[in-house]
Image (spheres, rainbow, N blue to C red):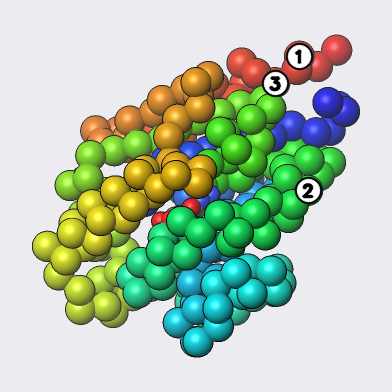
Amino acid sequence: MSDSQFTIAIDGPAAAGKGTISKAVAARFGFAHLDTGLLYRAVGRRTLQGLEPIAAAQALTPEELEQGDLRTAEIAKTASKVAVIPEVRAALVDFQRAFARRSGGAVLDGRDIGTVICPEAEVKLFVTASPEVRAERRYLELSAKGSDITREQVLLDVRERDARDAERSAAPMKPAEDAVLLDTSDLSIESALAQAVEVIEKARPAKS
Ligand code: C5P
């Protein structure tokens, strides 16, 4: 590891707080942040537009991650369907690994960062929360954007996506053996973040 390379892998199910924690941690330590879910969502969107998922993954450009709203319920569902395809996952590995090892430090959040993409990451967190708490958070996010989806439907979607992500054979969602588990069900954003920062501080090389 060069002095300026430091990778933080943050995995966990949808709406557990990974995104919020990752962004805040990246800002605090001055690291770059990659939400790897966006890669699968961009492939999902291309698939909804009629492209074949493997071809879409192989042709994906970083610019696509910035275009339009990828955070819709329909794209999330399609993302988790294309994410079971090993060739789709394989096409996205190099980009993620290069990002993880950029100089200046990197935070990647997803489902398989600590297990498959960066098993050598200096810090691994697995952020989780009960399905009900996660569904409520996602429901509030989607309704704030004007979606008319119901709470019940969001809970069903969350459970369906959890099952697909955890049970697939290619890079299933699971904590790495050496990941620190952080259950945010009963935590405020501030306490969850404080716990994440504590874990990271412990792993940072001491400045001489
Ligand atoms: O994190 P987000 O909800 O945006 O991810 C959308 C979907 O992309 C997930 O449900 C999962 O199926 C897939 N994904 C994945 N591996 C990652 C990140 C996301 O399989 N590292």
User: Gap between marks 1 and 3, in whole Å?
Assistant: 6 Å
Toward the viewer: 23 or 171? 171
- Give the label, 1 or 2, closer to the camera: 2
> Quarter of the image containing the N terminus?
top right
Residue 65 in view of the camera: no
Q: Position of residue 76 (x, y in %)?
A: 39, 66
Q: Position of residue 179 (x, y in %)?
A: 50, 24
* Res. 204 mark: 3
**As shown in the figure, which amino acid type bears the numbered disc 3?**
Arg
User: Gap between marks 1 and 2, in whole Å?
Assistant: 25 Å
Which residue is painted at 23% across and 39% down in the image?
130
Please give the count of numbered marks on the rendered protein: 3
Occupied quadrant, residue 122: top right
Within 8 Å: ligand 1 and the Cβ of disc 1? no
Residue 93 in view of the camera: yes
Determine crowd level at label 3: few under 14, some 14-19, many 20+ residues with C-alpha closer than 10 A.
few
Which residue has dot 2 on it? 98
Give the SS element for disc 2. helix
Give the left or right position of residue 12, taking residue 150 as reference: right
Which residue is painted at 65% across and 18% down in the image?
203
* Res. 206 mark: 1
Residue situated furthest bottom in the rendering: 50
> Quarter of the image containing the C terminus?
top right
Q: Position of residue 114 (x, y in %)?
A: 57, 33
**As shown in the figure, which amino acid type bears the numbered disc 2?**
Ala
Q: Are marks 1 and 3 in contact (CB under 8 Å)?
A: yes
Determine crowd level at label 2: few under 14, some 14-19, many 20+ residues with C-alpha closer than 10 A.
few
